[in-house]
Amino acid sequence: MDEVSKKRVFSGVQPTGKVTLGNYLGAIRSWKPLQEQYECLYCVVDLHSLTVTQVPAELRKNTMDLVALYIACGIDPTKSSLFIQSHVHEHAELAWILDTIAYVGELNRMTQFKDKSRKHADNINMGLMNYPVLMASDILLYQTDVVPVGKDQVQHLELARDLAQRFNARYSDTFVVPEGHLSKSGQSIKSLQDPTAKMSKSDPNDNALISLTDDADTIRRKLKRAVTDSDTCVRHGADKPAITNLLNIYTLCSGVSMADAEKSFEGKGYGEFKDAVADAVISVVEPIQAEQKRLLADKAYLESVLKQGADKASYLAQKTLSKVYRKIGLIPRIR
Ligand code: ATP
Ligand code: LTN
């Protein structure tokens, strides 16, 4: 397929803390194969992470760690644009315009806003409420066709679609209305300590999550401590949320089907099963860690990737933003 007729993909992760196995299986892993079919833009959304309090030095480190992680997970900078959100100033500018057509009522109803307001009751800032508008701006700025995200982001994607349609209806066709792309079984990896909650990188209980930076012993220990269900049988089902979650992780990391996995653990206890889950997770995580470490030692290379990514993204972003400004009646600057 030639470059012009390829559909466009955009996705991003926030550089907040340690990326979890949930982020990887639910989102980042699906990015690599998309590169063959689509023109992809993968972004480290640093402006989003400011909606919760950040320590500047940590934010800086987390951002570069995430850039290296994207590449270690198979994002090929010669195929896709990999960049940092704050390097392309149009994201914040389009967000302002979209703010003027987004309603307080609809933002106030967003599940993530309600959750995060509860978790950060001392810092319910306007950015937290505007978070989905900035996300819509990320997506609409590139005339994105497809957005790969985990299940928890579906509501935000709906808002991006609504804002695109609202703008198009008011000012004539301007934005592509994006579609979501949910990875099948990885769409929600649950906490190891509470299988009704999602595995989240900001969980204060470190035993609830597997971080992509955890070493083999830590992964084994966390899985040993993972909660289980009341009987001792290894099978999936709505009545067995904890084992279903571990089976999900196992099948996604090993490539074994659910039916084969259940058969192979028939009559075996949770101990043996958890060991096998740990082996499967370690075999996925270790090569990524080695590659990320190698990349982080080559700062010049990472900087060249980011420069190239931001140049390409800026070009596309600027095209959309000037179209938007023109349509709403702002006078273009004479150069
Ligand atoms: P935080 O805990 O700070 O809210 P997070 O772990 O939810 O962070 P994000 O940066 O918000 O991570 O999400 C990055 C991507 O990972 C999104 O596409 C999101 O849908 C996906 N994702 C996050 N958690 C999970 C999970 N437990 N299972 C599957 N996908 C997930
Ligand atoms: N809100 C997303 C991260 C994100 C994103 C995006 C994902 C910000 N902008 C644009 C896809 C497309 C999250 O995963 N928490």
Image: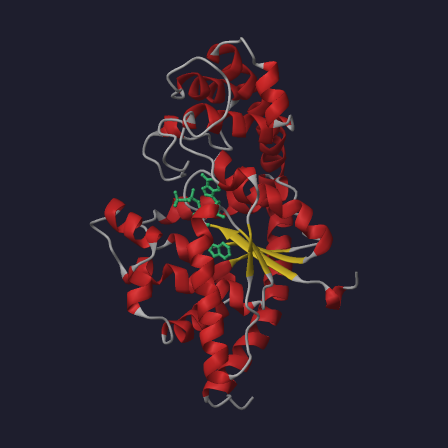
Where 113 sits versus 2, above or below? Answer: above
Where 36 sits versus 311, above or below? Answer: above
Residue 261 occupies which quadrant of the picture? Answer: top right
- Front in this rendered view, residue 56 or 191: 191
Q: Residue at x 54, y 8 (%)?
A: 267
**Where, quadrant-wise, is the N terminus in this rendering?**
bottom right
**Where, quadrant-wise, is the C terminus in this rendering?**
bottom right
User: Which residue lies most toward the left here?
Assistant: 122
- Front in this rendered view, residue 296 or 252: 252
Colouring used for the render: secondary structure
Q: Position of residue 315 (x, y in %)?
A: 61, 71
Q: Position of residue 129 (x, y in %)?
A: 31, 60
User: Which residue lies most toward the right here?
Assistant: 1
- Front in this rendered view, residue 34 or 264: 264
Q: Is residue 219 visible?
A: yes
The quarter of the image that holds ligand 1 is top left
Total marks in image: 0
Q: Position of residue 186 (x, y in %)?
A: 54, 38
Left or right position of 2 against 273: right
Left or right position of 301 against 108: right
Q: Is residue 298 visible?
A: no
Q: Residue at x 50, y 41 (%)?
A: 23
Q: Position of residue 5 (x, y in %)?
A: 74, 67
Q: Residue at x 46, y 53 (%)?
A: 154
